[in-house]
Image (cartoon, rainbow, N blue to C red):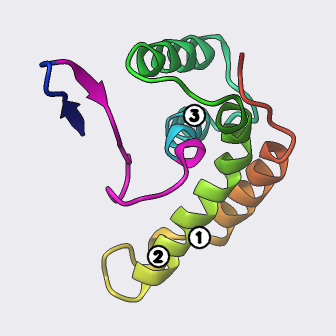
């Protein structure tokens, strides 16, 4: 959401990448990092993902500051985001939206291994 000030200035006041609801800034930022890590099945960003992350953060910071505590907490929310997605999948598995046939045990094992590795992740600088 962009908030327009009385003087015509524009400022990013709030955003949420998944459900457009209130929440932690660190979580919202983590969704971008998580998406890059999940797409590459990496425990930490490779060179391309790191460059995308830094460009994303620079773009965000060009509109609004990110408090240091929120920035450091981004990595903590990466496995939390994966747990959220697993909950979504589990909740929809029987409803036909995902279907249990699309959630094989090997996929869950791979994700569990990846989430373990993400526990040691630090927010890229």
| Quadrant, the N terminus | top left
* Vertical position of residue 17 compared to residue 63: above or below: below
Nearer to the camera, 103 or 77: 77
Q: Is residue 103 left or right of residue 96?
A: right
Residue drawn at the location 43% of the way across and 23% of the way down = 64
Nearer to the camera, 118 or 10: 10
Q: Which residues are magenta?
A: 9-27
| Quadrant, the C terminus | top right
Label 3–label 1 contact, CB within 8 A: no
Name the residue that disc number 3 marks: 33
Q: Is residue 116 left or right of residue 9?
A: right
Residue 45 position within the rendered picture, expressed as x and y whole percent measured from the top left? 68, 24
Name the residue that disc number 1 marks: 104
Residue drawn at the location 37% of the way across and 53% of the way down = 18
Label 1–label 2 contact, CB within 8 A: yes
Residue 53 position within the rendered picture, expressed as x and y whole percent measured from the top left? 55, 20
- Mark 2 / mark 3, whichever is N-terminal: 3
- Viewer-nearest of labels 2 and 3? 3
Element assignment for label 1: loop
Q: CA distance from mark 1 to mark 2?
A: 6 Å
Nearer to the camera, 108 or 25: 25
Quarter residue 8 falls in: top left
Name the residue that disc number 2 marks: 101
Q: CA distance from mark 2 to mark 3?
A: 28 Å
Extreme residue toward the bottom, this view: 94
């Amino acid at each position: 959401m962009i908030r327009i000030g009385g003087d015509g200035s524009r400022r990013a006041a709030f955003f949420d990448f998944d459900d457009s609801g209130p929440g932690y800034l660190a979580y919202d930022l983590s969704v971008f990092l998580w998406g890059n890590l999940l797409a590459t099945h990496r425990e930490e960003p490779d060179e391309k993902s790191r460059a995308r992350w830094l460009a994303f953060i620079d773009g965000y910071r060009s509109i609004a500051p990110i408090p240091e505590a929120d920035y450091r907490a981004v990595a903590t929310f990466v496995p939390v985001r994966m747990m959220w997605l697993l909950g979504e999948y589990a909740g929809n598995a029987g409803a036909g939206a995902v279907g249990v046939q699309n959630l094989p045990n090997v996929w869950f094992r791979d994700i569990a291994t990846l989430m373990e590795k993400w526990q040691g992740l630090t927010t890229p600088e």
